[in-house]
Image: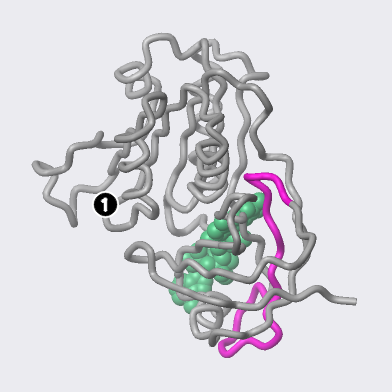
Amino acid sequence: MHNFLTLVEKRQIASTTLECVFEKPDGFIFQAGQNMTLVLEKLNYADARGARRIFTIASAPFEEGLKISTRLTGSGFKRTLAELPKGAKVQFSGPRGKFHLLKELRKVIFVAGGIGITPIKSMITEVAHKSELPRAILFYSNATSDEAAYHDFFCRLADTAADFSYVPSLTSSSKVNMESWPGERGRIDFKMILRHVEFPHEYVFYLCGPPGMVDELVDILRENDIDKEHIFSESFWGYESVGN
Ligand SMILES: Cc1cc2nc3c(=O)[nH]c(=O)nc-3n(C[C@H](O)[C@H](O)[C@H](O)COP(=O)(O)OP(=O)(O)OC[C@H]3O[C@@H](n4cnc5c(N)ncnc54)[C@H](O)[C@@H]3O)c2cc1C
């Protein structure tokens, strides 16, 4: 027997990012950071990879709906997803995945590249809601500011939660007036981390983004003597041609 989700809402939340909200099935339990597989019944456009994709649940477990957020790349799957009407049924399986927050962490550095923000958004929303936010710093890299999904949410949280700091960074200067950008510029590296965190070795790292970025960051952290037991990561394969 297949399980189905019902689409209740969809909206564009950044220049290339679509958020879909599904009704949460009764009894569906997941941990912040886990993912599920969606299967579209019928594709409106040809897609060499077929009708199935993995998406992280971007909403937090306490929230009412199940949200996913995705970059619209032009693939047949994504074009079909973007055209689904409210009330459409989508087959799913899950939740799955081991990328979730350990309990009772005191200091966490989150690093997200592009749509790799989804599990981190879920984790931070959940712990902030439970008033269990550890000392946390989010480094969030995007090519341009209009691509940074949930940017306003993290700005507001940084304004209201004393223990949360937000460091957005842009890697491209083509579409944005860099003089008015208050955040960092360039790829996230150890020098950037040190500009914002005095003792990074006291922190646990959660990394998510395209495989190239995640692999590079793990290498950088290891070269700088961050214990491998303090590094947790998830790679979103499937965006190889898009960058972050
Ligand atoms: C554990 C895990 C969690 C994930 N969570 C998320 C998530 O939360 N959100 C998310 O968005 N993704 C997530 N992914 C990745 C997701 O599963 C897809 O692989 C990814 O979204 C790319 O799918 P696609 O249909 O856009 O591209 P694919 O069809 O897989 O094609 C690969 C690339 O080719 C290009 N391409 C393909 N067709 C066209 C076309 N017609 N025109 C132009 N370019 C084209 C695109 O640039 C695309 O990125 C996750 C993956 C994993 C493994």
Mark 1 neighbour class, 10 Å CA radius: few under 14, some 14 to 19, many 20 or more = many
- Disc 1: which residue: 145
Segment colored magenta: 30-50
Residue 139, above or below 222: below
Q: Establish whether ligand 1 lies closer than 8 Å to the Cβ of label 1.
A: no
The quadrant where ligand 1 appears is bottom right
* Magenta span contains residue 49: yes
Judged from the image, the secondary structure of the residue bearing numbered disc 1 is: helix
| Coordinates of residue 7 in the picture (x, y in percent) | 60, 77
Q: Is residue 77 left or right of residue 163?
A: right
Query: Which residue is at 61% across, 56% downward?
Result: 57
- Depth check: give the residue in front, 2 or 193: 2
Q: Residue at x 46, y 14 (%)?
A: 200
Q: Is 137 part of what is drawn in magenta? A: no
Quadrant of res 103: top right
| Residue 152 appears in the rendering | yes
Quarter-of-image position of residue 23: bottom right
Eyeballing the image, is 51 above or below 143? below
Query: Looking at the rendering, in which quadrant would you find the N terminus?
Result: bottom right
- Residue type highlighted by circle 1: Ser
Q: Is residue 48 above or below residue 32?
A: below
